[in-house]
Image (spheres, coloured by chain):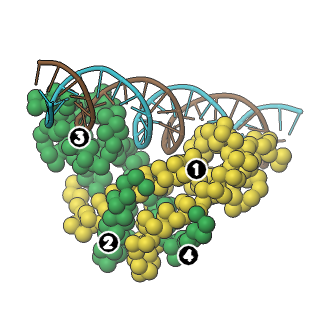
Chain colours: A yellow, B green, C cyan, D brown
Amino acid sequence: MADPRWLDDHQQRAWRGHLAMQARLHAQLNRRLQADSGLSLADFDVLVALSERDGPLRVQELADHLQWEKSRLSHQLSRMERRGLVERQDCPDDARGALVVLGAAGRTAIEQAAPAHVEAVQSLVFDGLDAAQVETWAEIADAVLARVDDRPAG
Amino acid sequence: MADPRWLDDHQQRAWRGHLAMQARLHAQLNRRLQADSGLSLADFDVLVALSERDGPLRVQELADHLQWEKSRLSHQLSRMERRGLVERQDCPDDARGALVVLGAAGRTAIEQAAPAHVEAVQSLVFDGLDAAQVETWAEIADAVLARVDDRPAG
DNA sequence: GCACAGTAGATGACATGTCAACGATCACCG
DNA sequence: CGGTGATCGTTGACATGTCATCTACTGTGC
């Protein structure tokens, strides 16, 4: 790396802004969700995915949908299973596999937690943005994602 | 929360995009940095802050600058001290306090790691964006940060 | 049937982040 | 001085995330 292309002022401002925003927003949303419903954002994401399907889901499918590594998901499911949020079942088609379903506590928790979480996202994020900014934001995310996904290993 | 304001399609696209982008970008940058130089992004942030000051820094000042909780920073410094990246010193002005300085290994590591990291940010992020998008991105970050900082507790 | 490479998921070790609580010190005020 | 509350930083317990590794099973080719 002889002569790296340093960030110019505009890029610097956007990048630092992004880093600060994402850190503080994530912390804030996580704290609110935790206080409201005892769920973490990770719990929430898993429960939303299971709610959308509303039925048994292969662990691998869930991992693909969430874009999580399988080991991360396995640990998360173990913690959530301990709390009754999800249940694991044997997979009839493939004895190696496992199915995950929403537990009773999980269904209750997600239904109770979702409205306040969405409201928090609205008030912290979108109430401060106009339509054009929202559109550009989506474009930015797509553009960066295309580049990141383009080189999975580096 | 009787009638939450759900996200419309545009907001949904921007929000999911942001979440996916940030997760994958962070993972990718962290992996590269780790592979290149054995540093994590957290290590990197601390070392950058110490480099900019280039001298002893109070723990509290460092925490303020990074916007980290003091306990997080304390743990991080302990791990980094173990590896020789930073050193802790007693604070002459305030016997409660502590000073942190760049260790020899830390200075070497940051100087070696920074160029490749900046290049990675350029190629993964900014090479895919035009000037207007960068400008809007910075506006978005500022707008959201203003709202998040406005309600520290929720 | 059997060997064997590949896949599904779990696990252990470890790095990271959060929260609550602590000991030490400081600043202020009587 | 001496008490009292605030501040500084650390610590321990625990949740989370990553990596490498493991076991059990699959599917294929022979």
Q: Is A99 left, or right, of B106 in this rendering?
A: right
Q: Chain of mark 1?
A: A
Secondary structure at badge 2 equals helix
Viewer-nearest of discs 1 and 4: 1
Kind of residue sitting beneath label 1: Ser
What residue sits right under mark 2 in the picture?
B139
Q: Chain of mark 3?
A: B
Using the image, tell me which numbered label, if any, was put on residue B60: 3
Picture layout, residue A59 above or below residue B109 = below
Marks 4, 3 in one chain: yes
Q: Closer to the N terminus: mark 2 or mark 4?
A: 4
Q: Give the x, y percent position of residue B149.
A: 34, 59
Separation of residues labelled 2 and 4 (CA atoms): 21 Å
The residue at 17%/45% (across/down) is B51
Secondary structure at badge 3 equals helix
Using the image, tell me which numbered label, if any, was put on residue B8: 4
Kind of residue sitting beneath label 3: Gln
Q: Give the x, y percent position of residue A15.
A: 31, 62
The residue at 55%/76% (across/down) is B8
> CB under 8 Å between callouts 3 and 1?
no
Separation of residues labelled 3 and 2 (CA atoms): 29 Å
Q: For the residue carrying disc 2, how many other residues have a C-alpha within 10 Å: few (<14), some (14-19), or many (20+)?
A: some
What residue sits right under mark 1 in the picture?
A37
Kind of residue sitting beneath label 4: Asp
Q: For the residue carrying disc 4, how many other residues have a C-alpha within 10 Å: few (<14), some (14-19), or many (20+)?
A: few
> CB under 8 Å between callouts 1 and 4?
no
The residue at 21%/67% (across/down) is A9
Work out whether residue B47 can be spotted: no
